[in-house]
Image (cartoon, helix red, strand yellow):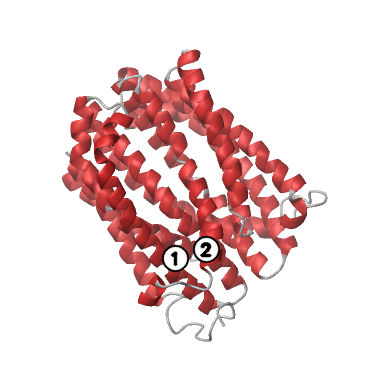
Amino acid sequence: MLTAFRSHPRDRLIAALAIPALGTLALDPLVSIVDTAWVGRLGTEALASLAIASAVFAAVFSIFNFVSMTVTPLVAGEVGRRDISRAGDITRTAVVVSVVTGIVVAVVAIAAAGAVVSVFGATGTVAIEATAYLRVRFLALPALLLVMVGHGVFRGHSDTRTPLFVALWMNVLNLVLDPLLMFGLDLGVVGAAWATVVAQTVAAGTFLVLLFLTRARELGTIGPFRGVSSVEVGRILRAGVPMMIRSASLLAALTATTIAAGHIGTADVAAHQIALAVWLFMSFVLDSYAVAAEAMVGTDIGEADVAGARSVANRLLALGFTTGCMLSVMLAITAPLVPRFFSASPDVANDLAAIYPFVVILQPVTALVYVWDGIGVGASAFGYLGGAMVVACALSIGTLAALGSTLVGVWTAIMVLSFSRLVALAWWHRVGPLAPGRGPSPSFREA
């Protein structure tokens, strides 16, 4: 395993995939970071309402984002087998399934927004603003699911630059619209939601043009639309159900932490939102290696090159761990600047100081977890990933039940979640399809 820390024959390809993905993944949570920074200027109640609304939206989005999570390895496998037409069929089907799913879920979620917000213990202005934000934000759910399918398709074709350009355009638009709608039109928290809706809808339209017009030939989507393939729907659903369970379990654990923080107090949940936003931002940065893993491992397995998949997986784990350690150092150095960036009140800043060490310490662990997740997705180990997350969620919520009366206890539960996932994924790597001794012949890529 120590050899994985040395240079690798496929480092150039890893960089070609991971660096643009790094930009994309850093930009995606920037929507939340920018909203949090602007809303923080409206006061603690507004920030608390955004914390609750963001948790609800993230939960719904992650659970029903199973199509994009499965489309990358499915497309990459067909690319590895040189069947571009079949990859195109998967793309068409994924687009339709994502849009239909988005519309149905959005209708239900808009109707239930008020009731869901009340579960978090929100009252008064916080509850009103959180509900209003959600009802607007859910309008873009079909567009956002389509955007994520676009990301998955291009990643499956080992193209992470195109998603970067679309994400950059989307986030620039959101950055411009946020202050205009929030303060120029005096829409407040709801203005932040409308800015995101417009930006994500424009991004969805951009992906449709790319998938079915300008890049259709290379993606296998050229020609008349042949309808939804029942075979591909079956493949997506078989892979998607365990990934829905995985996402639901992860978000159950994270949502439970926000609920617990909300019951502690308004300043506490605001501090929790800031810490969570920073942690998730760094997590998505680390996930750039997972994107490379999904594409490269998926393609290698499609070509029956198990040795190559194992070798590149080990290299990506080494790179991820090193990057995680560097991020820990950076976060420790910049810790005093975080409360100022989010315009935190003295009470919020004091609460944040108590839990910020968790954000710093968790970076290397998070790096390994995210990379191993990407390796598992690339290897289509959907069932194992779903089951492992259920166990980790149960352990985290059990910790929260015992210690969740304080913010330190809440973040201890998050640490338990991360370490539980780490142990489960390390075990899979040791005994699963990429374990040493499987596919022992040298990879043709490294021969």
Q: Is residue 60 visible?
A: yes
User: Which residue is under mark 1?
Assistant: 316
Tell me which residue sits at (47%, 54%) in the image.
288
Residue 175 in the image: x percent, y percent?
50, 29
Q: Is residue 107 visible?
A: no
Q: Which residue type carries mark 1? A: Leu
- 56 or 144, which is in the foreground? 144
Kindly state the secondary structure of the residue where label 2 is placed.
helix
Quarter occupied by residue 262:
top left
In the picture shown, does residue 189 fall above or below 229? above
For the residues labelled 2 and 1, the Cα–Cα distance comes to: 8 Å
Q: Which residue type carries mark 2? A: Ile
Tell me which residue sits at (46%, 75%) in the image.
434
Query: Image quadrant for the N terminus?
Result: bottom left
- 4 or 196, which is in the foreground? 4
Give the mark nearest the N terminus, 2 or 1.
Answer: 2
In the picture shown, does residue 407 fall above or below 160? above
Q: Around disc 2, counting alpha carbons within 10 Å, would you say few (fewer than 14), some (14 to 19), or many (20 or more)?
A: many
Residue 154 in the image: x percent, y percent?
63, 53
Quarter occupied by residue 56:
top left
Tell me which residue sits at (34%, 28%) in the image.
118
Residue 17 in the image: x percent, y percent?
55, 58
Query: Going by the image, does 237 lie left or right of 133?
Result: right
In the picture shown, does residue 82 fall above or below 59? below
Kindly state the secondary structure of the residue where label 1 is placed.
helix
Tell me which residue sits at (59%, 47%) in the image.
163
- 118 or 415, which is in the foreground? 415
Query: Going by the image, does 129 lie left or right of 155?
Result: left
Query: Image quadrant for the C terminus?
Result: bottom right
Contact? badges 2 and 1 (CB < 8 Å): yes
Q: How many marks?
A: 2
Q: Looking at the rendered structure, which numbered label has been put on residue 14?
A: 2
